[in-house]
Amino acid sequence: MNQLGLPFSLDSKMLLDNFVGKKNQQILDFISQLSTQKAPSVVYVYGGKSSGRTHLLQGCAFAALKEKLEVTYIDFNQDLPDGVMDNLESLDWVCLDNVNCLNENQQQELFDLYNRSVQTQVKLIMSGDDLPTELNLLKDLKTRLSLATIFHLESLDDDSKKEVIQSKMKNRNIAIENKVYDYLFKYYSRNLTDLLKAIDCLDEASLQQKNNITIPLIKQVLSI
């Protein structure tokens, strides 16, 4: 995979196959259709924190890799060198995460990439935290992004968040009782990112203590 020497690693658990949310099926179907098309395409997805933007874009990258295509994934929520988007239009898939974090130089680079991409077969998939018109970006770039096929990612309910965590735990052969999830949601956080980090800490503690993940362990590890 072409990562341009950048320090990015993909999470092997972030696949399109386990991307949850019934209302998100529309975008999954659309992305599936893109893989069979030879024309260029620009897609913009937006949603709040923990809506699954990174999961979706990394899932696209893995799907492209599975088809032996040239792909890159870049997260603009990190410090990046100038010129990071040079020549990306020559790839098959380009996944640009958190474009709401672009600095001024990067905004111009994305504008130029967008213009070059229409002459190629690249699939340009981008994410942000709001509609293009609401982002603090250059006017011309917002206009370009507004021309993309736009999808709003569904905010996950508690059951969907449980499904995400349970999928992660299943890969580790760990079962967690529903009352444990209920306790975390009530006393710790309903934010999926926070919950996943907490589960990782609890998993490590349970392995050290050779115990299951329980409410007493939550109280001990998370101080709640």
Image (cartoon, rainbow, N blue to C red):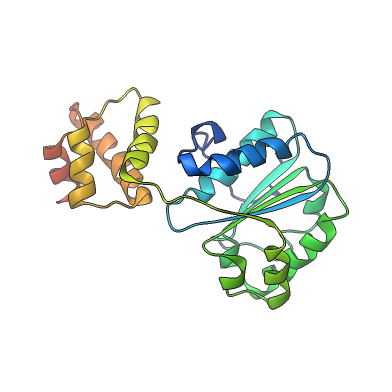
For residue 94, above or below residue 144: above
Residue 140 picture location, percent across and down: 73, 74
**As rendered, which of 203 and 140 lies closer to the eye?**
140
Drawn side of residue 150 relative to residue 22, left or right: right
Q: Is residue 179 visible?
A: yes
Q: Above or below — where is 137 with respect to 10? A: below
Q: Quadrant of the N terminus?
A: top right
- Give how far across and how far down residue 15 sits, in percent: 54, 35
Asked if residue 179 lies left or right of residue 78, the reply is left
Quadrant of residue 175 in the image?
top left
Q: Identify which residue, 186 or 149, lies in the foreground.
A: 149
Q: Identify the residue at horizontal 56%, vertical 72% (top origin).
A: 134
Farthest-out residue, bottom: 139
Residue at the left extreme, as displayed: 216
- In-image side of 172 versus 5 (left or right): left
Front residue of this view, candidates 148 and 83:
148
* Quarter of the figure with residue 119: bottom right
Judge whether 218 appears above or below 89 on screen.
above
Residue visible at 64% across and 34% down? 63
Q: Position of residue 178 (x, y in %)?
A: 22, 33
Q: Residue placed at 35% from the left, 30% from the top? A: 169
Residue 120 vertical position relative to residue 111 in the rendered view, above or below:
above
The answer to whether residue 58 is visible is: no
Give the residue at x 60% y 62%. Answer: 99
Q: Position of residue 153 (x, y in %)?
A: 51, 51
Count of numbered circles on the image = 0
Q: Residue furthest right?
A: 119
